[in-house]
Amino acid sequence: MKVFHNKSELSQLIDNFKTKNMLIGFVPTMGALHEGHLSLVEKALSENQVAVVSVFVNPTQFDNQEDLVKYPRTLETDIELLKTVSDHKIVVYAPAVEDVYGDDVKSQSFKFDGLENEMEGAFREGHFNGVGTIVKRLFEIVTPNRAYFGEKDFQQLQIIKKLVELHHIPVKVIGCPIHRAEDGLAMSSRNTRLTENHRKVAPFIYETLKSAKTKFGTKSAKNVTEWVEKQFKKQPLLELEYFIIADTDTLKPVKRKSTKKTYRAFVAVYAGDIRLIDNIALN
């Protein structure tokens, strides 16, 4: 497996692939890989001749610097995990911050037609400027044909699709289903930091989302939201930051249901000091 820490060397290899008309799939990650990431890589390899996986903890998308410091960095383990998918069709790009940003480690300012102001954008100031900055730079470095993102970060997925549209970036962005543990907890690199007690109660998040989906069939968004908030008040180990039912396209909270629109429920929860997010399609 080829591992590159330098974008110029990576670019030479990619140019070589392209002279052979090989299709390149791209899976950007922040490392601490798990089965969810591997499912994205498998999807990339099923549709392309080679998969480039970036492993880079991006400093500009953390509004909490303590979270940045604590974020797990497990490159050697990540490489071994990727080898279980393929040892010769995967290329790893694991750069230092300087290789990506040079001396200017800061975010660009983006507008995503208002998508950036909802949910995560309202609670994590500047987060999507950091996401837009790093994804745009990685697209410019890797120049993939297709890029793969998990739907757990559904708002991020919609924003990246908008980034590609607004900046005319020649890449097809593909969303992939949320990969879950057997008990329903959405796979996340942060899950490894949960205490034993928090890990035991964390599946409550998805169970509540499933119940909310059922209720949304007959109840208003307001009624479902109030029900969810009450459920979390009964669970002392989990602190609800937000639960929002939103239009899938605009991500704006729904006020009155329409049969012509699709909706998703989004949730952010603190389990101790670990922040977990999840979502579910409602119709």
Image (spheres, grey):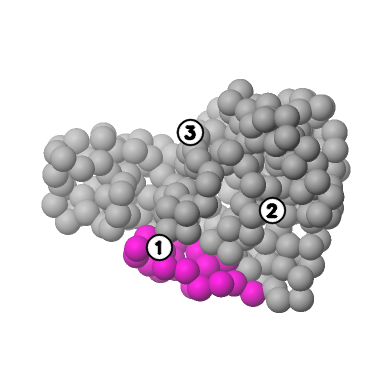
Q: Residue at x 64, y 32 (%)?
A: 23
Between 251 and 123, the one nearer to me in the picture: 251
| Segment colored magenta | 106-130
Amino acid carrying label 3: it is Pro
Q: Residue at x 84, y 50 (%)?
A: 9
Between 48 and 84, the one nearer to me in the picture: 48
Which residue was labeled with disc 2?
Answer: 141
- CB under 8 Å between discs 2 and 3: no
Q: Quadrant of residue 258?
A: top left
Amino acid carrying label 2: it is Ile
* Image x and y of residue 180, in percent: 54, 33
Between 162 and 169, the one nearer to me in the picture: 169
Which label is found at residue 112? Answer: 1
Amino acid carrying label 1: it is Phe
Horizontally, residue 105 falls left or right of residue 92, namely left
Q: How far apart are the alpha carbons under marks 1 and 2?
A: 22 Å
Assign a secondary structure to mark 1.
loop
> Can residue 241 be seen?
no
Q: How far apart are the alpha carbons under marks 2 and 3?
A: 26 Å
Which residue was labeled with disc 3?
Answer: 177
Mark 1 crowd level (few <14, some 14–19, many ≥20, 10 Å Cα): some
* Image x and y of residue 66, in percent: 68, 70
Question: Can you say which quadrant of the picture contains the N terminus?
Answer: top right
Q: Is residue 115 above or below residue 31?
A: below
Q: Quadrant of residue 98?
A: bottom right
